[in-house]
Image (cartoon, rainbow, N blue to C red):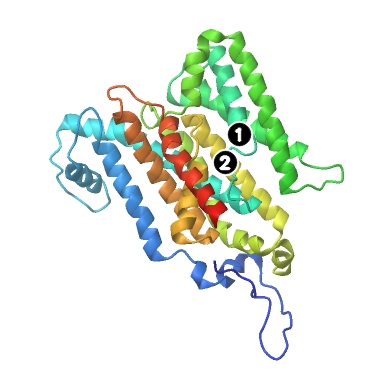
Amino acid sequence: MTTATDGPGLTTGPSVAPVEPPDGDDIVGTLPAATDLSPRWLLAGLAAVAVATVVGIATGPVSLPLHRVAVELLDHLPFVSLDSGLSDTQRAIVWEIRTPRVVLGLLVGALLAGSGAGYQGVFRNPLADPYLLGIAAGAGLGATLAIVTGAGDGVGAFDAIPMFAFIGALVAVAMAAALSVRRDGSGGPATLILAGVAVAAFFTAAQTYVQQRHAETLRQVYAWILGRLSTSGWDEVLLLLPYALVCGAVLVLAVGALDVLAVGDDEAQALGLHPRRIRMAVLVAASLATAAAVAVSGLIGFVGLVVPHGVRLVAGVSNRRVIPLSFLFGGAFLALADVLARTVQAPAELPIGVITAFVGAPFFLWILRSRSMA
């Protein structure tokens, strides 16, 4: 790993003297070029997204030729006019049924993986994941309340289950943040993690109590908990897109600062950064992105934990590479996992959380074994 150990605030020569520290906005440009996101890796991530998109749209009960699907997608690009040869019925399947679902999978996977990379960068812990601060438990309780009260009978933007899940996730994160602050106003990452564990336990207990009181809804609750990417068109995509754009932009813009924080808070402060503000901004963006993703897809595990690990293994440990590539490969991973969920037991569907667990758990165990033997 190449790190900014010397930093731009030092000059070399017979004596080493501090100079005026650069502004926070300039810090990204002062890090070593070896940690930059190279065009090669960016193209690899974009290629993975493109392949997952075409495969996801072409695969289903009605099989569509891969090359015709690719041409149909290209035909909708600006200044491009191509004839895919698909019939009107096939075009309707592509644009009204499969494309919204694939795009939703890309967005959810990108947000979960990118948020996981952000959490790991803030806590300097490769075991951190997007559900660390009780988001999963809060969303689960919110969705359970919507189901047992009968409020979750709407469609798309009018479905109360995503709204209740989103509110529950935000309440859980807010409680963890409030409980982690000491009387003197201080607090640290370790305290925040412990508060998140306590909040998650409380919300899980509350959800279990509600489920036992309404046993007839158990099947529906567990179907949501195991995750799904069912859509009613483009409504869910439009609900999630603003969170993806805003939160994704915050996380990507913070990559340089997170690399400096990895060296140490004292070094970061010497360079004009504010470690606490940076961590707060990243945590808020990652938590909001995760809450939005969970609200529309349910609880899909291992994406935010395994994908950043895989990126580190092949592309390096710098956040300037890990976070952007986690967005791309995370989206591609979940879109392809959804293809398996739709086809393994066709015409029935497996919960996508089962697929990600089957793939992610062995990979994660292999990583743990490799780290313990190193």
What crowding class fits label 1: few (fewer than 14 Cα within 10 Å), some (14-19), or many (20 or more)?
many
Q: CA distance from mark 1 to mark 2?
A: 8 Å
On-image quarter of the N terminus: bottom right
In the rendered structure, the answer to whether residue 82 lies left or right of residue 245 reads: left
Question: Nearest the camera: 117 or 100?
Answer: 117
Q: Residue furthest right?
A: 184
Tell me which label, 1 or 2, sits earlier in the chain: 2
Residue at 64% from the left image edge and 34% from the top image edge: 134
Mark 2 packing: few (<14 Cα in 10 Å), some, or many (20+)? many
Q: Amino acid at mark 1?
A: Ile
Dots 1 and 2: beta carbons under 8 Å? yes
Instruction: Report whether 101 appears left or right of 146.
Output: left
Q: Identify residue type, mark 2.
A: Pro
Label 2 residue SS: loop
Position of the C terminus by quadrant: bottom right
Where is residue 143? Give x, y as percent.
55, 22
Residue 135: mark: 1
The vertical placement of 292 against 37, above or below, is: above
Task: In this rendered view, identify the residue nearer to me: 35 or 87.
Answer: 35
Q: Label 1, secondary structure: give it.
A: helix
Q: Position of residue 139 (x, y in %)?
A: 58, 28
Q: Residue at x 63, y 44 (%)?
A: 284
**Is 100 displayed left or right of 327 in the figure?**
left
Q: Confirm whether residue 247 shows in the render.
A: no
Give coordinates of residue 337: x percent, y percent.
Answer: 37, 37
Name the residue carrying label 2.
130
Res 354 visible: yes
On screen, 40 above or below 11? above
